[in-house]
Image (cartoon, rainbow, N blue to C red):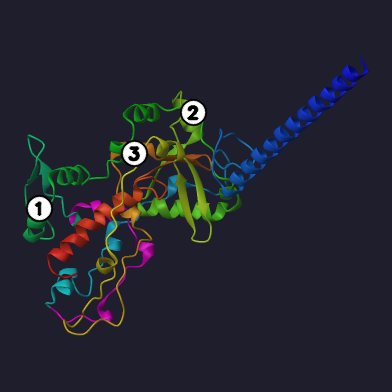
Amino acid sequence: MGNFCRHVKVLRIAIYCTLFDSICILLHLSLSIEAMSGRRAKRGKPGGVAAPGGRDTVFLKREGFDPMGVEKRPLKEACEAPVVSFYDAISGKVAVSPEDIKLTDERLFVAGGQHRAERNPLRNWELGPSGEAVCAGESPLGAEFDRYFSGYAENEKIQLIEDKEGVKIERWVEPEYVKARLAGRATLTPNSSKVYDHQEAAAGQVYEGLRSGQYTCLGTIGDWEDSHELYPWNNGVSIEPKKPRLVTAPIDLNEHTAKQNVVLEGLSEVRENVRWDGVGEAPCQVAHDQKSGYNNMSLSATGKLLFVFALFGFFFCENTVPYGCLNASHCQQRGSMVAFGFLRYLGVL
């Protein structure tokens, strides 16, 4: 009987130790999850539901912030005549030196340049009755470009023609999800706490985006509530304060988007020396500046509605491909391939 009691006592101690270990493990997991959530918050990833108060900037009204009064920058300000035309420079018709190259002030930047009619190389390409690619007039880059583009695979031509007025980003998003987003929802996605810490920089980026045409202000959240049952389905925003750059965080949208591969060109094709005099190499290499690269590509009408954000009590939509979009780099690379491929076709690169 005594041995039995001792065994029972040992068994009880073992059970207590097991329970204690389990509690410790659960407590450790709880603390780890809490710490991870804290780190995510510090990194500025939005999540949850936006509500007035606290550090969220969706409903926060900023004194003096008036996006409705910002006018879009006139296009003519950003279209000064170059000292030497681009075609003359690449064709070797004239002698060109680095001093002849004139860069436009970035403060005069106008968004959507790749799709503006006067410089859109595909403006005269259309889809025929059977959905085939048809050239209805000469490209702004000349008949030589049309001959070059005719050599593209038919499916590539069709997709680029479909996008000539604005990138149809929705083609890669699940159709039912697009319908759900366009229908709206009862809550708003919060912004990163980084925006609260850098409100002045965020407001400045919004103003610049409105002037360049990157953003359109849709009105106040209050006005929307008065006339709609549901909010537009918005994306949270964060900010990179050192640049500064306001960044869309379409986390949920990206999860329902099919990732498109980015085709990278070889190093020998990217780093090309420009031979200014046709014999000697240039003293410096020429690079393609990507700072405003995505903002050169307009979005389709549906695409704009997929990229709505709320800030300082106002709704905005993005008119150009956002930096945070899953397939932004694919769209940028695809557009660049048309331009740089044509230059190699001419024998310039």
Residue 131 occupies quadrant: top left
- Per the model, the C-alpha gap separating discs 3 and 1 is 27 Å
Task: Give the x, y percent position of residue 163.
Answer: 22, 44
The answer to which of 96 and 337 lies nearer the viewer is 337
Q: Secondary structure at mark 1?
A: loop
Residue 104 painted magenta: yes
The answer to which of 243 and 347 lies nearer the viewer is 347
Q: Secondary structure at mark 3?
A: loop
> Which badge, 2 or 3, is on the more N-terminal residue?
2
Residues drawn in magenta? 94-118
Residue that appears at 76% across and 33% down: 21
On screen, residue 57 versus residue 333, left or right, reads right
> Which badge, 3 or 1, is on the more N-terminal residue?
1
Q: Which residue is mark 1?
A: 151
Residue that appears at 54% across and 41% down: 46
The answer to which of 291 and 99 lies nearer the viewer is 291
Q: Which numbered circle lies on residue 225?
A: 2
- CB of mark 3 within 8 Å of CB of mark 1? no
- CB of mark 2 within 8 Å of CB of mark 1? no
Indicate the amino acid at tag 2: Glu
Residue that appears at 32% across and 39% down: 303
Q: Which residue is mark 3?
A: 258
